[in-house]
Amino acid sequence: MNIGEFARQGRVSVRMLRHYDALGLLPPAHVEPATGYRSYEVAQLARLNRIIALRDLGLSLRQISEILDERVDVEELRGMLRLRRAELAAAIAVDTSRLAQVEARLRTIETEGHMPETEVVVKSLPPMRLAELSAVAASFGPDDITPVIVPLYDELERRLAAAGVKATGPSLAYYEHATGTGGQVTSPAVGEGAVVVHAGCPVDLPLGNTLGFDVVDVPGVERAATVVHHGPVDTLMVSGQLLSRWVDANGYRPVGLPRELYLACPPDAPKEWVTELQEPITEA
Amino acid sequence: MNIGEFARQGRVSVRMLRHYDALGLLPPAHVEPATGYRSYEVAQLARLNRIIALRDLGLSLRQISEILDERVDVEELRGMLRLRRAELAAAIAVDTSRLAQVEARLRTIETEGHMPETEVVVKSLPPMRLAELSAVAASFGPDDITPVIVPLYDELERRLAAAGVKATGPSLAYYEHATGTGGQVTSPAVGEGAVVVHAGCPVDLPLGNTLGFDVVDVPGVERAATVVHHGPVDTLMVSGQLLSRWVDANGYRPVGLPRELYLACPPDAPKEWVTELQEPITEA
DNA sequence: TTGCTCCTCACGTCACGTGAGGTGGC
DNA sequence: TTGCTCCTCACGTCACGTGAGGTGGC
């Protein structure tokens, strides 16, 4: 059989047969030295079929040649298949989640006529060491937070300067519910709905409180939903709402402490502030 | 911000940012002419996040740059997302089926301690024009088939030779249940379980019966499970059983006429015959 | 002076598809 | 002579990872 016939019988392309020949995976039974013409025997269909069957499992040609040439023992073979099984399960999970996101986009387009210009992105957050001051605010509303957090940062800045310490990156604030799950009660005299506001700056100092502020470690987070907010801090709630709705709509659940990373905060241009809102999440 | 900081904030690699710059997808706000150093602005995080969000849907960078630079209108955007949705659904279906096959292999290894050396492969079968003779056999067992099919092929060969006709490829036999679904009753005097045996050779002739044999079209089949059998025809049943079990175990159902393609049949070496068994299938 | 960060090529990945340019047998 | 099949390069695909080899600022 010449290469064309063999390809037709095996329902593969001629190019594939040449490729398998080049890899040594399925060399032709005979090659005419004068012309280079390949010729195959019917019996080689069996090997071709094995190759195709294993390829259809999604194994690589390198793996297939190792299996067919018996360079792997049963135990290794089992390992390869288990790995493949895990890869497939992971790929299915990823694609299923992607499919849900694509469908959410399609729904957004139907109702709003365009794509959102602000994107929520899921990422991991690194652990950080912060110098911080904290205080209690009556609620999570901006009207209660702002009068608490602004003096905290002013004071922190003053104390850092006094101690001769420089921040190693953008400031990070985070919030704990003063009562309820997840947060420890810092002050006993706070009402329901109150939050502890932590105003922090990343520093390179030992843990403790020896310079007039706390030095603490904020743990890293495996998965957090984030949005970048542009504009003055009193409009942060808009992005906050967006973020909450997104978390809800995409089958996640908030877990842990919400954070704000102050990426850009020119003191004299509050409209040009850039803040990243970070909400640690887990599958609902 | 230099490229390193920007990459850290955006949780992406420096290489990716350079890549996006090279594609024109996210050029830095400023490039120092002397050194080539890139610098980014915080505001560019928004665009980076949009890129990441769209990439997480599985869109290509080319598509993303078309979307972000508004070179597609809403209708095209919807089309892209619908296409993506279809691709994802297809990918999930493929991977789900692969996963089932991998699990089947693992079970085989557990019980038999090795991989099967004969593979069942699913492929499409092309339509063929055959010159054929047919007759009824009492059952599908080899003891009933062989005494029917051998003289059929002998006779067919004689008549083809007499008509000066040459086969254009390997012979194909196919089988119909003489009674029951899917087959028309050819002879009224046959019992339950009888099969009509069609012995055919591919030819290049007009349809009809003018030369002492029927010229018919066997339709193509979209999906058939196939095995290549090596050895004498009286051992065909072994591979036949394997094929049936495979079809059953992999969530398929036989549909249409089973076939045998005689790939190699040296007349004086029955042990070296190579036959492909073909079973048209559909999802069960 | 020693790290650290930045830069530009440029190869490698994976399994082929798709020409380009040419040849042998009917 | 005209199709048909075969051959060997070799580029393109896709989104980067990973060196190699070198430079600027603290």
Image (tube, coloured by chain):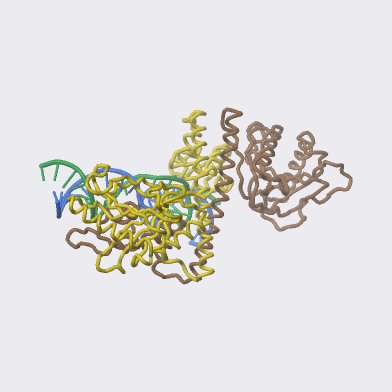
Chain colours: A brown, B yellow, C blue, D green
Q: Quadrant of the N terminus of chain B?
A: top right
Q: How many marks?
A: 0
> Is residue B191 in view?
yes
Q: Nearer the viewer, residue B137 or B36?
A: B137
Residue A255: x and y in percent read 72, 48
- Find the residue positioned furthest to the right: A189
Vertically, is B161 above or below B270? above
> Is residue A14 in view?
no
Q: Nearer the viewer, residue A218 or A107?
A: A107
Q: Residue at x 24, y 46 (%)?
A: B204
Residue A175: x and y in percent read 75, 45
Left or right for A189, reference B15: right
Q: Nearer the viewer, residue D12 or A270?
A: D12
Left or right for A102, reference B235: right
Residue A69: x and y in percent read 39, 68
Residue A269: x and y in percent read 65, 32
Q: Nearer the viewer, residue A66 or B243?
A: B243
